[in-house]
Amino acid sequence: MTPRNIFRLALAIAAAGYLAWSQLAPHHAAARKPAAGAQEPPPPPRKLGSLAFQPCTLSTAMAPTTVAAQCTRMDVPEDRAHPGGRTISLAIAWVPSRDDEAAPDPVFMLAGGPGQSALESYPGVAPAFSETRKQRDVILVDQRGTGGSNPLSCKGIGNASGDQQVPDALDDPATLRRLTAECRDALAKKADLRFYTTTDAIADLDAVRAAIGADKIDLVGISYGTRVAQQYARTYAAHTRAVVLDSVAPNELIFGNDFARNLEDALALQFKLCANEPACAKKLGEPKANLDDLLAKLKANPQPVDYRDPQTGAFAHGTLTRADVAILARMYAYQPIALATLPIALADALGGHYAALKAQASALNGNLGDSMAEGMQLSVICAEDADGLKVAPEMASSVLGNQLVQALQEQCAAWPHGTRPADFHQPLVSDLPILVLEGEFDPVTPPRYGKQVTQHLHNGRMLLLRGQGHNVIGVGCMPKLMAHFFETANAKALDASCLDALPRTPPFTSYSGWEP
């Protein structure tokens, strides 16, 4: 595994990123520019509170989706204890309501990761906000250290982008520490890495809230963004009106500790669909057993393979490794419709046909990491979770094993640690109206997390979406339900019966699809 792929593997199995794997490399948001030679004067800025915005377009690389928006920047102190020191220029986008008289409480969408950009990620989930935007503005703030807000990226630093083969992080922790130190030292030229935590980020959000003139705001946190939302709702409860937590990470969670177990549970649930389909079971056997057998085979003997590169269409030669398949299983599990294609690919691979898996792994590997600010992710984890990371011996033989936890322990040993409030890992106990959403098959934040969070919410309610994975606000009738929740600020009165019709995706028994 190359040094760069050590970082990628940590991101792939750690990041509770909220887009499907095919959307993991969004373009930076950019303002539309006039044609070459044009001398059009810039339009007059639109004001929201004290901030002046200019037209811009948000776009994503993996889909033809664009979103017209208004963009601006706002400076905040990097270290609020020393406001006269270095500042961070926050990238901010405003997606206006379609109603000229927007409700006074805008919706802030909080991105996942940690390490994803809100501006870059929004186009992928924009349809989920279509109903909400009939009455409310949507505000996007690139969290400090991501996207356009002084991004802390480790790509291209030292040997991290090289192609040298080096031992795995578990066998050579010194190499991982060295690469992390190189990243740290390069980023330290433009940032004090102690001040890129969730606690710093919610202070930024509240500064933006005040600047746009909103007394109260609504929050939509997705994956890691649910940690941000919970911390904001506790610290700034007086300025919080209503909250949606999509694929929630409880405040008590130590980032990394449960991920191997959660994936095992999710794969068992999803692969059980094959066992319940006679045609699938007869043709493909037991997918989980096939996965375990293939991982053991590849660990002992990585397989050379000729395949067609899915991005260029050209024939290529490569090697299918255990890490390739583990990452593939992890990321496909986010979206059950993607995981439905895995059982047949596993059966083919055990028959000696590796091209399909290698092509899929190549496509995924080409997109991983580009949407994550690795340095920001380490600033968050090392301040908030590192002292609670624990190796689970019983997970050693699982798909993910303990590699993530051990890699994070090594990285955090070399990374500057910020601070966290004493109550940071205490559950959110709140009277605010809070709607919690969970996917039945979520491999990252399983439904038990939603139940754990909801028991402390006096005006909270959890909805379980049948057959779904990670990030569910755009599924079925959820966009209408979310809009209605923000209209009424009453989770318990919400009629969610429209979710009862959600299907489970049957496993593919051929590359044409599932059995009729």
Image: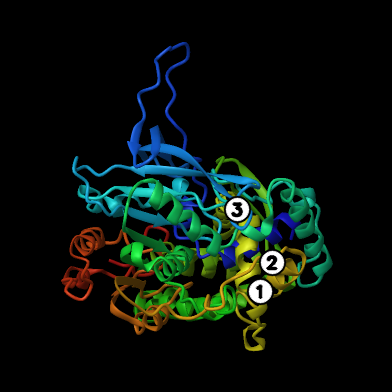
Q: Residue at x 81, y 65 (%)?
A: 167
Q: Name the element at disc 3.
A: loop
Q: Residue at x 71, y 73 (%)?
A: 409
* Residue for badge 3: 373
Q: CA distance from mark 2 to mark 1?
A: 9 Å
How many C-alpha atoms fall within 10 Å of the one at disc 2: few (<14), some, or many (≥20)? many
Task: Tell me residue 338's x, y (percent).
Answer: 43, 62
* Residue for badge 1: 386
Q: Is residue 101 visible?
A: yes
Task: Tell me residue 196's x, y (percent).
Answer: 60, 58
* Along the viewing direction, whichever of 246 and 196 lies nearer the viewer: 196
Residue 435 in the figure: left or right of residue 161: left
Of labels 2 and 3, earlier in sequence is 3
Amino acid, disc 2? His
* Along the viewing direction, whichever of 335 and 226 lies nearer the viewer: 226
Amino acid, disc 3? Ala
Task: Tell me residue 432's x, y (percent).
Answer: 30, 72
Residue 396 in the figure: left or right of residue 444: right
* Residue for badge 2: 417
Task: Tell me: residue 500, above or below residue 373.
Answer: below
Q: Residue at x 34, y 66 (%)?
A: 238
Of labels 1 and 3, earlier in sequence is 3
Of labels 2 and 1, earlier in sequence is 1
Indicate which label's residue lies in the foreground, 2 or 3.
Answer: 2
Q: Name the element at disc 1.
A: helix
Amino acid, disc 1? Ala
Residue 486 in the figure: left or right of residue 45: left
